[in-house]
Image: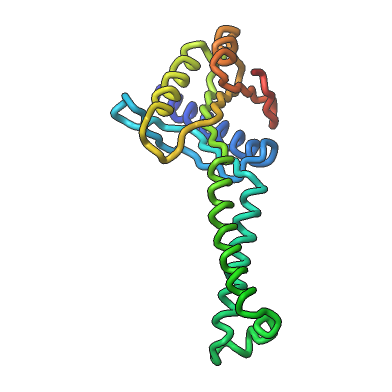
Amino acid sequence: MSKKRGHYAYNKGVKLEKDFAAWMKNKLGYHRILPRQFVRGKVASRPFEVDIYGIKESPFWKLFEILGIILVIIALLTMIGELDAVRYYVKDIVEHINLRVRGAMAIIGVLGIVLGYWGNKKQTKHAWVECKNLSTNVKRDHIFKLNSAVKDVRKSKDKTWKPDIVIMVSGKGFDIDALNFAKSHNIVCYQQEGKKFKKVV
């Protein structure tokens, strides 16, 4: 019987994670959502499991990077267009762009890629989401545990990623002490309400 209950509780938790992952993408603007990721801390010997890892990129810098890639491709096409094998396909481009312009396009394109990548990396936000689909409200101890894990990861030398935003999601609700502690440690709290999620802190 307890095995059945354990399986039911696990499925409830997985459903909450999937629902909130979809919400993050559709309503909070996260570009990439990765379930069940592991991240290393400084003190803990074993990595921490993150229910949902969300990545929100900067549209401006991403566009910069994409435009840089396009410029480099065009510049390369015009340069290899000098070869007989591909002259026919790119002759219209080659005829209108001289060598200096091609070189400048390649340089600007490479700079665009580098700056876009750098800017996007600086502006990208990483979210650590913990989901609790319990039969009771999320307690203060759950927030303590999450905060302790986040602190350890932020002190780590592991350069994979570090959380900029920490989110606790509850399928039922939060104790007042849990909300107070979350607020004092900049942990954002969401409560599920039907098919939607309401920010409570």
Residue lying farthest bottom?
A: 84
Q: Within the image, what quadrant is residue 76 found in?
A: bottom right
Relative vertical location of residue 105 with respect to residue 127 in this rendering, above or below: below
- Locate the C terminus by quadrant: top right
Residue lying farthest left?
A: 45
Q: Is 105 displayed left or right of 41 in the figure?
A: right
Q: How many marks?
A: 0
Residue 144 visible in the current orientation: yes
Q: Position of residue 118 (x, y in %)?
A: 53, 48
Q: Within the image, what quadrant is residue 127 found in?
A: top right
**Residue closest to the eye, 155 or 136:** 155
Q: Position of residue 99 (x, y in %)?
A: 61, 79
**Residue closest to the eye, 66 or 97:** 97
- Locate the N terminus by quadrant: top left
**Residue closest to the eye, 122 or 52:** 122
Relative vertical location of residue 78 with respect to residue 36 in this rendering, above or below: below
* Residue located at (66% from left, 87% from top): 91
**Residue closest to the eye, 57 or 50:** 57
* Residue located at (60% from left, 61% from top): 68
Q: Is 64 displayed left or right of 11 in the figure?
A: right
Residue lying farthest top?
A: 177
* Residue located at (45% from left, 38% from top): 161
Q: Within the image, what quadrant is residue 103 found in?
A: bottom right
Q: How is the image coloured?
A: rainbow
* Residue located at (71% from left, 81% from top): 96
Q: Position of residue 106 (x, y in %)?
A: 57, 68
Q: Position of residue 36 (x, y in %)?
A: 45, 37
Residue 136 visible in the current orientation: no
